Image: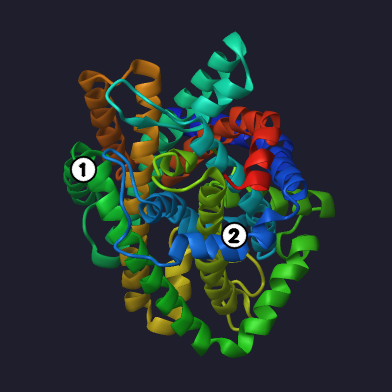
Amino acid sequence: MYIQPETMLLKIVSGINEYLSNYILVFLLLGVGLWYTIKTRFVQIRCFGEGLKNTFGGLKHFGKTHEDGMSSFQSLSTAIASQVGTGNIVGASGAILVGGPGAIFWMWIIAFLGMATIYAEATLAIKTRTKDSDGNIKGGPVYYITKAFNGKLGKFLAGFFAIAIILALGCMGCMVQSNSISYTMQGAFGIPSWIIGVVLVVICSVIFIGGIKRLALVTEKIVPIMAITFIVGGIVVLIARAHYIPMTFGMIFKYAFHPQAIIGGGLWYAIMTTVSQGAKRGLFSNEAGMGSTPHAHALVKGKTPHEQGTVAMMGVFVDTFIILTLNALVIISTLYTPDGLLANGYVGDITKLLTKTNLVQTAFGSVMGLQIGAIFVAVCLMFFAFSTILGWNLFGKINAVYLFGNKKYSILIYTVISLIFIMIGSLVSCDLVWEMADMFNNLMVIPNTLALFALTGVVLSSLEKKT
């Protein structure tokens, strides 16, 4: 029997991801997060107020930047732009569908521990950044990986990370975002996906060519607007479903430890599915431990390593505990409660109708009306995913420069390739795109977390001295 190449590739990549997620990713993410939580004496709690002050205290529009860098607010906006994307909407929906409502509990755990992890990442990004001969700031995991491991091992791990992030974010990641934009816009407005792809390519080209300054100016304006819009819409739905909110939280905690009651299978299989979905989608959502956001934090002016570490923690908090949680509460309170479509779990004919992409549209539509709900989510997702494309392209470009040098032709080639992937992403199968992105995301975690463990002393010195 003939098997289509895409189907075969999807099966292979899915198998790799299942192994990485279940046996490597969960333990690395939980391990490094728990390690830094203990070593920093719960920095995410002790320095939470300090993080709020460093991020929003005395906020002007919006601080000074390096000549080729960012203000602290711009770096946070760029980091949040990369964090708050389809992982919050499509990713959370997929986690709930596959792992049940309990997957959100494990996303919370990953995020809480991840706040300590991302503190370490941002701290190291500031401490190990350098300037090139033209005075441009260079920073990110490749620089602290080579500090953690001397000689050939450090160069190999840094090179491995650089290649993985270029493929994960600059290529496959942008495909995920453009795929989600085209799918939801087509569903909401009937716009052909190829038109969405062309429009995205044109707009992104203009911003990419403008460099870091133009990207920072765009993200600092888009991120607050998109976050507030989605939050207001989510609150409207939750007010309408207020009587189900206690039950919603109850299901999150109940099915975190007894997931087989809603997703089927044996207890051990169900728990592993729920935990791995929470970890995998939690990583894709807040990116703590993945090594992406340190690139933005490395470009900041006027902050000590400790201060920027506390700013980075706010990115995870906003991403997971506000936006992702709001989205999850909307989905569970409308679809999993007694009058919801998934009250009996994801079984039967409903599996032919609901996917991780249209699930959240259905949830919002149950209160706003199907058409308005679809439009609202499509517009929000468009801004979320678009801003993520901008942030991820920058992170990939920084690593392309590390590998090939700051040459115009290498940057141009990278930009053209990224734009091609954005166009392809608007046209191809969603499942394969997600699995490919997940695979390279998972691979990025390995060298990044190894370096984080190795440089514990450097991070702790910044926390103790706060300099």
Image: 329 above or below 284: below
Tell me where residue 339 appears, x and y as whole percent.
59, 83
Could you say which disc has been placed on residue 201 in the image?
A: 1
Would residue 320 be seen by someone viewing this image from the given angle? yes
Kind of residue at disc 2: Leu
According to the picture, the residue beneath numbered tag 2 turns out to be 97
Give the crowd class for mark 2: few <14, some 14-19, many >=20 residues within 10 Å: many
Picture residue at 55% right of the left edge, 49% below the top: 309
Image quadrant in which you'd find residue 230 = bottom left
Q: How is the image coloured?
A: rainbow
The mark that comes first in sequence, 1 or 2, is 2
Q: Nearer the viewer, residue 148 or 332?
A: 148
Tell me where residue 156 appears, x and y as whole percent.
55, 15
Outermost residue toward the right in this view: 267
Image: 373 above or below 188: below
Q: Is residue 139 left or right of residue 99?
A: left
Kind of residue at disc 1: Val
Instruction: Check disc 1 and report its element: helix, strand or loop.
Output: helix
Picture residue at 27% right of the left edge, 24% below the top: 134
Image quadrant in which you'd find residue 224 = bottom left
